[in-house]
């Protein structure tokens, strides 16, 4: 139940146009996560010969792509695989003198809960080059979003966390969120902005307020005020999201994940067997282990704390942090 890390989305990709669906974008984020250790701000990467790279494959468990929403059917997965293997990312210069079309994921396979995504060597530099800037955001928070507009807006807002505000024209924002079908501002606000901001404020690690600016009677600009939620609030929210996600898995999936986590603790073979055999104990382990992994409390002996939580014996060695 380890907390998913922050990911870094290169500015080149963030500002490009890629019309991914909800599930496709989550696959895209999972690839960014997998490439995290290869990403660099070294400008030399821009002149490196693309032939030095090799094709890559990323194996992703379905549980990495879903938070609290309904898990996909095989039909949904087939549709997402069919679409993402033909989706193009489009890069255009501001003066329209150059453009590039890239299909980043030409092959997708699915087998028993795992999706394997193939990326061609030609596109890897685009995904690992941070030298032109990037937006950093929490993958867990991003995956919790169920609106495609919120998925597009959240990384753009996180880009401006350092300054705390982002002023953008309504026309530019409409284009960035790929919401051109709502030319009237009232419809755009109701069906795109309000829905996205409600989700972002409720489900992510940031809080966002807006201020509208008019030119005459027409709203032309929006200023977003962006700040991180209180650290304690984030920890408890992450803990709740982690538990909800894990408990939403099937019984077999929970058993598989818990069995893999046993290596991090010193539970006896008998205790491990009892946890896997009893669903109530299994769920208690998930809650206790998530509490430990999220750092919600100061756990002096993680194994003892988990054992006490699951089996009801011994003293839970924890000094819970007080909310400030």
Image: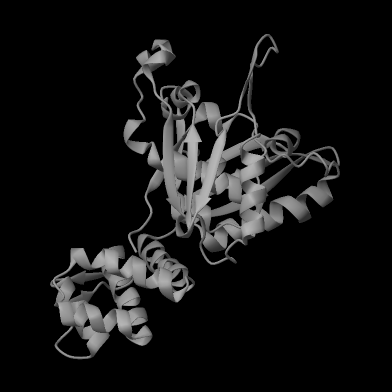
The figure's colour scheme reads one colour
Seen in the picture, residue 8 relative to 309 is either above or below; the reply is: above
Q: How many marks do you count on the picture?
A: 0
Seen in the picture, residue 294 relative to 183 is either above or below; the reply is: below
- Of residues 161 and 53, which is closer to you in this image? 53
Can the viewer see residue 320 in this picture?
yes
316 lies left or right of 232: left
Quadrant where the N terminus lies? bottom left
Quadrant where the C terminus lies? bottom left
- Of residues 301 and 175, which is closer to you in this image? 301
Seen in the picture, residue 36 relative to 305 is either above or below; the reply is: above
Can the viewer see residue 164 in this picture?
no
**Whole-percent x and y of residue 277?**
31, 83
142 lies left or right of 43: right
- Of residues 173 and 180, which is closer to you in this image? 180
**Whole-percent x and y of residue 73?**
62, 62
**Whole-percent x and y of residue 301?**
13, 73
């Amino acid at each position: 139940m380890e907390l998913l890390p922050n990911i870094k989305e290169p500015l080149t990709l963030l500002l490009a146009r890629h019309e991914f669906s909800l599930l496709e974008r989550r696959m895209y984020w999972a690839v960014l996560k997998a490439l995290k250790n290869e990403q660099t701000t070294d400008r030399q990467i821009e002149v490196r010969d693309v032939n030095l790279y090799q094709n890559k494959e990323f194996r992703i468990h379905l549980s990495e792509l879903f938070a609290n929403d309904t898990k996909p059917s095989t039909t949904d997965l087939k549709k997402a695989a069919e679409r993402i293997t033909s989706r193009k990312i489009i890069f255009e210069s501001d003066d329209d003198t150059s453009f590039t079309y890239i299909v980043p994921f030409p092959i997708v396979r699915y087998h028993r809960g795992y999706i394997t995504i193939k990326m061609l060597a030609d596109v890897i530099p685009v995904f690992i080059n941070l030298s032109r800037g990037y937006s950093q955001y929490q993958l867990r928070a991003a995956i919790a979003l169920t609106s495609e507009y919120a998925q597009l807006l959240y990384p753009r807002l996180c880009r401006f966390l350092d300054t705390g505000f982002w002023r953008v024209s309504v026309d530019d924002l409409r284009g960035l969120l790929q919401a051109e079908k709502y030319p009237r501002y009232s419809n755009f606000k109701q069906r795109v902005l309000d829905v996205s901001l409600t989700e972002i404020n409720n489900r992510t690690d940031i809080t966002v307020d807006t201020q509208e600016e008019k030119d005459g009677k027409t709203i032309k600009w929006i200023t977003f005020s962006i700040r991180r939620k209180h650290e304690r609030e984030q920890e408890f929210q992450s803990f709740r999201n982690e538990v909800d996600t894990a408990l939403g898995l099937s019984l077999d999936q929970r058993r598989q994940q818990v069995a893999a986590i046993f290596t991090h603790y010193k539970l006896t073979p008998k205790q491990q067997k009892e946890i896997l055999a009893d669903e109530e104990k299994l769920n208690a382990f998930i809650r206790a282990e998530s509490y430990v992994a999220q750092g919600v409390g100061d756990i002096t002996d993680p194994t003892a704390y988990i054992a006490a939580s699951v089996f009801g014996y011994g003293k839970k060695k924890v000094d819970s942090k007080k909310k400030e």
